[in-house]
Amino acid sequence: MKLLKQCLVIVLGLLCIHVSKGQNANLSIIDPQIGWLSYRGTIEEATVTIRPVGVYTEIGLYLTVSAQGAGFQLGRQLEAVMNFSLPKNAIVNDSWLWIDSTIIRAKILDRWTASSIYESIVSRRRDPSILTKEYGDRYTLRIYPLIMGQSRKIKLSYLVPGEWSAQNVITQLPADLLRSTQGSTPPIDIRVFLETFWQEPKLPSHPEVIFTLNDDPKLGKFYAARIPTGGLNGRSLSFGVKAPLKNGLFLSRYGDNQQGYYQMVLFPDQLLDFTQNIKPRRMMVLVHYNPTAVSPEFTLDKLLDLIKGQLKRTLRSQDFFNVIVAGISPKPISENWLPAKASEIDQVFNSLKTTNISSFNLPGLLGKGIETVKKSGLDAKVLLFSNSGAEGDLNTSNQLIRELSAIKGDAVIPFYVVDFATQGVPYYYFNNRNFYGNEYFYLNWSRLTQGEFQQVRQCCNFIDQVASTVIDLAAVEKATLDLHTALQNGFCFNRYNLNQTGELNDLRQPIIQVGRYQGKWPFVVELSGSYNNTLFLDGITVPLTDVSTIDSTGADAWSGNYIAALEKNNSNSNTVEIINTSIRERILSIYTAFLCLEPAQGGEPCVTCNDQSKGQPTVGTRDLQDSLIISKISPNPFRDQVMIQLKFKELIDLSAAKVVVYNHLGQIVRTFSDVPQGKVQDLELHWDGQSDAGASVPNGVYIFHLQTPNGQISRKLLKMDN
């Protein structure tokens, strides 16, 4: 029924975690023969499958798209064009297209071949329909033909590294892409497939959505949840599991005891013995909340839960914290610093939910925070969450900075500010620019105290991400690090560090490494460097019993990093190697493309592809070619009538069979209603070259297609002039 699809996809990305964020995806419907006219497309159904595999998470995105609401004539052959971004380090490794109930798995070709094939079908002299990597983190997916009044189903698969903390692994899901639909987002089914060492699946972006455990006879055990219609409007989408760390390390491999690929996550502050002697960190948390300056859905309880989660993620049990909330006469929760144990943090912030936090007196809150830190006589940093906009005027801001500076004196008390005012906040204009709310005050006060400031202007997708950025900066402990990995009787090579930018690294942040190994296990990790002019050398030996085994996605992850490294080195000498590796490993690159074609044009039905968006595998994807004894088409080419004769080795159930003839555009021109019911071994059908409407079809190539619960088979027919 529908034919070709191309899914251009790129690998790279950027994570915007500051201020508001624009739409990073759009779905448009165009007529290839007109070009200039386009409408916004519709995502009718969406399923996201999630499978953590080592350091990475494998994402399967199933979408059914249509031109619903577009102003084209019914039956018009259109093209769907989806432009979107994926996260940094994403590795696109597969693409599928459904033709009726049959899955066509994409071929990966060099860019120019794929472009030529797709162009010959779409028949227009432009170059937007190749399945290629564009630039940065941008991808393009094109589907043709999309018949006005009908829909097409596709799947896009990619690997993306999780955001690791000592407690959780969080994966950002493509919310922008799902929001690119016309109107509200459709219900989104989430299906999670976990190995035993992955536990506690959740949706941090949607805590109200709960997973249920399912046991399907075909798919096995999986966790399922559904985000209702419109559930992504104005919200991000993230998935989380408990981090499977042991002594601050997680190690997985694909291969045997001699050679293969490994993935590792390492938290230096948990591995290194000397870090236990680092003096504890102290965090003074100041909370201001004005319900009129933020969207109604971002309640005080949500703010307190956000802060609580960030503190539990960041602080160690040997660290300390305290809290002061805004009020007429603000005062700390405790006269002494509280141990940053998870239970203590939970107790404090849960109790604050019944506290009357004032919408005013931000200056008093700041002053009390400074006084409390100075009184303790201990080094501490201040973390301010506020949505006040009353102190942003130039004169007010400067006067407040002078008064706070007088209270602070010579004490070093860095302020780290999260400003989440998003509603009814005034603009102030001076120094040849606009300042939003308290922006001028926060910016200058944080700089003056050697802290950091981040602002959220659009509620409420990114408050958690901004808060994470700010508190990470507040808790940073920098050291020069040198990591060496090897086997006890072998070596590691071709290593890629996914999140290290130089020798100076935060001891709290994980080192994520992908590499290859050769030799005999166990695995050896050595970490050396300097912290506060103190040299250190520490290490650990990891036995096989502490290593998780993953599938061939382990090789995909390494290949994706290898290709990305070659692409960064923009040299012509790398082009051939990129293309060869990309095609051999089925990993999308700048110079290659994933191309799905209907069987008549060279596409091959995928027998092993399992549709995890449904409760059971796709029916009838097996090719019945091996079951045939006789396959006779006579005459072929034909003029007036053609006979299709099939004889099978075993009985074939035709009770639920679909027997049709497609034209070269994938449209059904004839449906056979006289197919025998029940199980048969012989099938003989005749076609007179007429359409279902009774008109003689034009000369050309047609495809006879038989789809049964057992499988499917296609045969090419050629109609000629009388």
Image: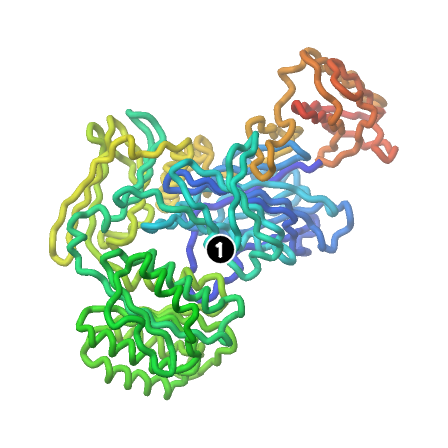
- The quarter in which the N terminus is drawn is top right
Amino acid found under the numbered disc labelled 1? Pro
Tell me where residue 704 appears, x and y as whole percent: 73, 25
Near-viewer residue (413 or 582): 413
Q: Is residue 253 visible?
A: yes
The answer to whether residue 632 is seen in the rendering is no
Vertical order, 105 against 143 (above or below): above
Position of 183 with respect to 16 (left or right) is right
Q: Residue furthest right?
A: 694
In the rendered image, residue 523, in percent from the top left (x then y), is placed at 24, 33
Q: Residue at label 1?
A: 207
Q: Is residue 190 above or below residue 351?
A: above
Q: How is the image coloured?
A: rainbow
| Label 1: few (<14), some (14–19) or many (≥20) C-alpha neighbours in 10 Å | few
Q: Quadrant of residue 119?
A: top right
User: Which residue occupies 58% across, 42% down?
Assistant: 62
| Secondary structure beneath label 1 | loop
Residue 414 occupies which quadrant of the picture?
bottom left
* 153 displayed left or right of 50: right
Along the horizontal axis of the image, is 406 left or right of 659? left
Does residue 150 sit above or below 451 in this rendering? above
Which residue is at the front of the view, 347 or 674?
347
Instruction: Please tell me in which quadrant of the rendered image residue 653 appears.
Output: top right
Can you say which quadrant of the picture contains the C terminus? top right
- In the rendered view, would you say 368 is above or below 618? below
Would you say 77 lies left or right of 27 here? right
User: x, y percentage for residue 185?
Assistant: 61, 55
Residue at the spot 28% in from the left edge and 42% down from the top edge: 246
